Image (cartoon, rainbow, N blue to C red):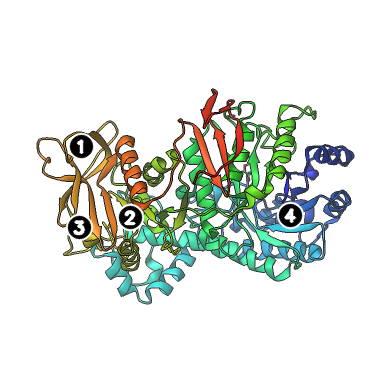
Amino acid sequence: MYLGVDYYPEHWDPSMLSEDIEKMKEMGVNMIRIGEFAWHLMEPSEGQYDFSFFDEVINRFKAEGIAVMFGTPTATFPAWLVKKHPDILLEDEQGNPKSFGGRRQYCYNSKNYQTYSLAIVEKLVTHYRDESGIVSWQIDNELGHEGSDMCYCGQCREAFHTYLSINYKSVDELNKRWGTIFWGQTYNAFDEIPVPKPTITVHNPAMMLDWARFRSESLSGFANMHLNLVKKLKGDHQEVTTNLPGGFFGKWFDHNEFSRDLDFVSYDNYPVWGGLTEPVSPAFLSFTLGFVRGIKRENFWIVEQLMGAQGHDIIGYLPRPGQAQLWSYHAFAHGCSNMLFFRFRGMNRGAEQYCLGIIDANNTRSRKFYEVQEVFKEVRKHEEVFQIPIKSDVAVIYDFDNIWSMRIQQQSSQLEFTNELMRLYQPFHEVNVSVDVLKYDHDFSDYKVVLVPVLTLVDEELAARLKAFTNNGGTVIFSFRAGMKNKDNNIPLGENLPYQLKDLLGIEIVEAESLHAGQQVSIISKDGNENGQGQVWRDLIRTTTADALYSYSDRFYKNYAALTVNEYGNGQAYYVGTGADASVLSDLALTVLNDQGISFIESEPGVEVVVRGRHAIVMNHNHEEAIFDGNELQPFETKILEWNKI
Ligand code: GAL
């Protein structure tokens, strides 16, 4: 098991190295991650490669038994490169190139950037392929993060035309499927098609979805070029990964498209960042790790784990004593198998002076140092528990086409895919049920429950798989707006909604209403005993074969169902037609868990329990003491208990 730190030796005077190594050993480090922003140091001018600085660093660490993960340095290109080839810069929607000075301001479709970046990677990996000290390569750094997934330059425009001509074969086919007859937008040739820079009103939604797919393909094309090159050149003892950033569904790329071929998936875990006044919720944190675990359906690495407060300009919340430790144990509980903390020492110059690390600029051991030391000790003690694969009975599925379609046409100002995913996820998390987060193309037939948040876009194949899953005894829970559109991002003609899902769900959506901030509707249970609220959206549902569990209770629409269940083969299909409140959904989750015979664990709010094998990892996220199963937990304390109750 590797436990270590992100280290940037080039930031410091070489005379500090010995002392840094000593401190790392004292902390329990057996891996450092280096190199990912140091292109200029390796190629100070075009074609002049020099790896001597890192040769020395790697040797020094190797002598101490500390392994290296080496990052390819292509997230920050040297100034000489952009001076010679300004066309490597990505352009914003106003046509302005980004300036040199930050990071990742390159265009994935720039031929010059592809050539130069592959050249440095080739030299670097060839130089170190036999280096036993390097056990792993990281491609670039947080591909597509911080807005670097979008570019409107001329090279992207040309590549977009090629992408469309490959996918549609003829411009007539494109005109038909995009519906360009509307507003007289018919194209005579692919090269007439714009990139979606600002216009008056809005662009064609079918075109926008293809643009999103094209952005994703641009990024994964670039990532895969690098991945394939490193795989071809590296030593057999070396593995390849890349570090995924957070904010998954706010990106214009599908992480799965370049991550499944990695030797292992890595993630940068920041439960709080920048100006956030408080960390994300435990449920949200668990969902993020479920997403990372879901890419390959296996345990993963964290190569940046937060220890100090972070921010480029505004600094965020300072983790309370023990809280960042809790987040580390939480990550291990949810499938992290190896962990590196960001970063060994905060940098006192340059852009990230306020991205604090384990050691601050005063260069002395403090609370954070001892917290990391303790995490490493405890995790090693329980290594066996943390290596056990995670098997969940519940999965939530997503499809980036669907998410992009909703970002293109939000429909309700309150509709955000991540929130709607969390609405279905949270009630299961509350009773400590493990939920995997999967792209829809995974085989989900071995789960018992599949959650399907706002699947606006649906294709025949996915609908058929969901039907087969339910027919075989599974439970599927859809939320509103399901089956609204086809994969061209168009509303099907002559179909009652939900498209492709009517028989599975036993309902028809008669009309629908978007609910904006502050608007909510009342719903009432079938027996009249329970009242609830709906936000964001409401579908007015007419049941065909389904049973109405809740209906709306307002004067005009009280004859319509709001939440339904349909018996389908050996299973059940639920439809939650509005953004139902937590208590309605908690009841629903408990019903489904009981029906499917899935065991769950009740704990007080903020106390999370993850069962791994015969152990329960119990985590108190609260700022106060808590009790679980007779065990007292201090604020942010984690306990690993023997557990034979499930
Ligand atoms: C990450 C990034 C690191 C560093 C860190 C600061 O997103 O990969 O290079 O910028 O944030 O918190």
Badge nearest the viewer, 2 or 4:
2
Is 373 situated above or below 450?
above
Q: Is residue 383 visible?
A: yes
The residue beneath circle 4 is 70
Q: Secondary structure at mark 1?
A: strand
Residue 105 x, y percent position in the rendering = 59, 50
Residue type at numbered disc 2 = Val
Badge nearest the viewer, 3 or 4:
3
Residue type at numbered disc 3 = Gly
Disc 1 and disc 3: Cα gap in Å?
20 Å
Disc 4 and disc 1: Cα gap in Å?
56 Å
Query: Quick one: label 2 or label 4, which is nearer the N terminus?
Result: 4
Query: Quick one: label 3 or label 2, which is nearer the N terminus?
Result: 2
The residue beneath circle 1 is 523
Badge nearest the viewer, 4 or 1:
1
Residue type at numbered disc 1 = Ile
State yes or no: Cβ of the residue under disc 2 lies below 8 Å from any atom of ligand 1.
Answer: no
**Label at residue 30:** none
Image quadrant assignment for residue 205 = bottom left
Residue 55 x, y percent position in the rendering = 85, 55
**Label at residue 476:** 2
Q: Residues within 10 Å of mark 2 (few under 14, many from 20)?
A: many
